[in-house]
Amino acid sequence: MGWPRGLYSGLLLALTPLIWRRIRREHALTDSRQSLRELRLGRILETPCSERMLWLHCASVGEVLAARPLIEALLMRYPEHRLTLTTMTATGAERARALSTSRDDGRLVHHFIPLDFSRAAARFVQRLRPELALFFETELWPNLLHACCSRGVPVAVINGRLSPRAFRHYRRLRPLMREALACVDWLAAKSAADAERFARLGMADERIDVVGSLKFDITWDAGALAVSKHLRTRFGERPVWVAGSTHEGEETVLLGAHARLRERLPEALLVLVPRHPQRFDAVAALCEQVSMPVARRSRDEWPEAATAVYLGDTMGELLTLYGAADLAFVGGSLVPIGGHNLLEPAALGRPVVTGPELANFEEVAEVMRGADALVEVIDGRALAAVLAKLFSNPAERRRLGEAGRAVVAANRGALARTLEGLAWLLPPK
């Protein structure tokens, strides 16, 4: 073991109590039987060693959703393989399991990814025996990458993303990153800027291709669209806006903007969708605290005329709820989170509004700005003014929605380029 990875592994061991505290919190958010049995130490039990296996790792729910077109394409392109989808978070696990149960062939299975201890990583890869390992976006785990490399498993980083902030952090660990990236056979970067940052960390230029962002290849099923139409019918003619993937501290600002909007449009309805399920109850209590009558989707409550907020406290329905609204605000952007996927509502033809914190989606935001398909606000007061303006101007809402949908359509194609690159590592039958 080289000294950078040895030092890294020693630091992980020293931080074990803090790491396990975080893992216990994750266990509390989901059905923990699988995760406790596996103990995040690579002890998967139910996957037969004889099966041909592909492995895709996504950090959380957003990455799982973005990877869905790739997941479906891999299962179609490699019919003799099963696909193991690993996640780090409980919310990602819930979404992965939903995708798994939606299939009836048993070819998509979920596991929590092991903690990046060297023995756990080695055990996991040895037990899974994948023929190809795919890491989504910025999931660079040195010991897992080394475990793949030492067992001859081809490794690809898909939709490779490295924000300027992440690059600054990784640059301090350049010897470790250089050693980890040496285990990557191919990196499919989503932009030229990301490719350059990976190269500066030590990734070989000849192993990097710029393929574009898989998030432009977003898909949705007919069933979800049918539910959207049903919801829109039930909402009636009242103005409806969705605030999706919101975070702590952000809901207070959004509810304040909604209160200002209702001074002009008393019948306006906010569909509020917190990012993390452990906060559903707290957000419901916050709505009541600020005198915003709330109906909760998880309890099959329907918003009545006096209802101000419809709480989307279910998993995996954000696209459905976007589709039922007149316009969408994408959360994680009024607090220093870095924003979330602007393309989900855009693909549905909904006008997209966002706050200023867009570090995670700056390239996407730039494309949308260039097409005049994005409305940006700096705070809750500005948001209230924009909402009132858009609700009073249906023609502008239609223009923004059409512009956003055109941006998504014009930038599709990363999926095909990604599959073409993967065929070099594992040719399809």
Image: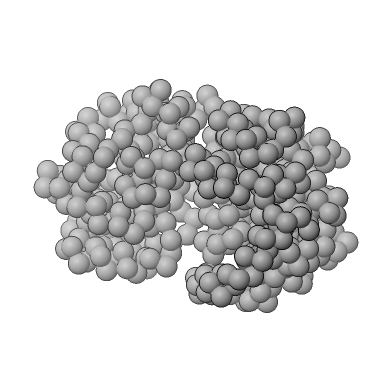
Residue beneath the point at 36% across and 56% down: 247
Q: Is residue 310 visible?
A: no
Does residue 399 show up? yes
Q: Quadrant of the N terminus?
A: bottom right
Residue 421: quadrant of the picture: top right
x and y, in percent, of residue 21 in the image: 52, 74
Give me the residue at 71% from left, 30% from top.
205
Q: Quick one: 252 or 166, which is closer to the camera?
A: 166
Q: Percent from the top left, x then y, of residue 116?
A: 67, 62
Q: Nearer the viewer, residue 35 or 299?
A: 35
Task: Residue at 64%, 70% (x, y): give it.
Answer: 13
Tell me: 401 left or right of 180. Answer: left
Point out residue 410 in the picture as x, y percentages from the top left corner: 52, 24
Q: In this image, 237 relative to 373: left or right? A: left
Q: Is residue 364 above or below residue 222?
A: above
Rendered view: 200 above or below 184: above
Query: In the displayed image of the protein, which residue is found farthest to the front?
Result: 3
Observer-nearest of 16 and 187: 16
Q: In screen coordinates, is 286 left or right of 213?
A: left
Colouring: one colour
Where the C terminus falls, by quadrant?
top right
Of 158 and 9, the residue lying toward us: 9
Picture coordinates of residue 340 (x, y %)?
A: 44, 45
